[in-house]
Image (cartoon, rainbow, N blue to C red):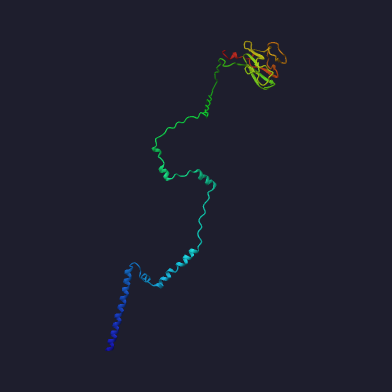
Amino acid sequence: MAIERGETTAGNEAKAVKPHKFLGSLRDALLAAGRDDTAPAGAARARSPDPAAAAPASAPAAPVAAIAEKAPPVPEPAPQIPSAEEAARLARTPPAPKVADIAAAPNDADQPPTTRVIRPDPAKPRKVEPEAPARTVLVRGKQKIQHGVFERDPVVGFLIVVGGPGLGSYRPIFEGNNTVGRSADNRIPLDFGDDTISNEAQAYVRYDSSDRSFLFVPNLAKTNVVSVNDKRPAGPVPLQPMDVITFGRTQVAFLPFCGSDFDWSEISEA
């Protein structure tokens, strides 16, 4: 019976010890949960102040710092040099105004309008715009031609230079009496550079509309003589078409426009 009691007592002690160990583990778990409600149970063990466990966590930092010190510095990018075309475009583009300058500038809308007076520069000649030519009028059918009075002396013939200075030139012969000489004041000026021709009235060419005839009259008061068809006339000489008259070193051919076939009186009122 004693043995049975001892065994029972021992068994009871063993049974009593086991609940204490279970309660201790439960108490530790509740304390850990109270310190960090959100962390798992394994995290509570990781927070235990174990120096042996904390040492390996800081060990990998040393190699990273050593690699960072040994790495070569990164070179800065070289500045880009603009091309010649871009540099010219930037030079032509005015710089943008600053905000302070815009705020300090006066507002044009607040300023009163000013009137500017522009006067022409007397040193500069005025540009005269040419007038537009008149438009051409379209003519249909037969038109009536008006014949009125003469606005200028009518041409009745020509003297054409066929030898000497002014070869190929011509001078018109007008109705009535025409003086022939080197000066431009003559009615028929032979001013082509022949200084052997008298300056004024070396001869006369006349046209008479009443009988439609031409006369050549030399000025006998002049020392320089003239000739008609290589003959020196001493008085008036009737002229025929293509007669050649010589004045010094100049020869002219006579070509009539009026004559027996035509005269201006046929188509004019005066």
Residue 146, by quadrant, is: top right
Q: How many marks are shown on the rendered structure?
A: 0
| Residue 262 drawn at (x, y percent) | 62, 15
| Residue 241 drawn at (x, y percent) | 68, 16
Q: At 33% across and 69% down in the image, what residue appears?
A: 35
Toward the viewer: 203 or 71? 71
Q: Decide if residue 239 is on the left or right side of residue 114.
A: right
Q: Is residue 247 above or below residue 114?
A: above
Q: Please identify the quadrant where the C terminus is shown.
A: top right
Toward the viewer: 159 or 259? 159
| Residue 201 drawn at (x, y percent) | 65, 14
| Residue 21 drawn at (x, y percent) | 32, 77
Toward the viewer: 195 or 207? 195
Toward the viewer: 7 or 32? 32
Residue 252, by quadrant, is: top right
Q: Is residue 221 above or below residue 168?
A: above
In the displayed image of the protein, which residue is found farthest to the right? 230
Q: At 30% across and 78% down in the image, what residue appears?
A: 20
Q: At 41% across and 42% down in the image, what residue appears?
A: 104
Residue 230, by quadrant, is: top right
Q: Decide if residue 177 is on the left or right side of residue 69.
A: right
Q: At 49% across and 63% down in the image, what residue appears?
A: 69
Q: Please identify the quadrant where the N terminus is shown.
A: bottom left
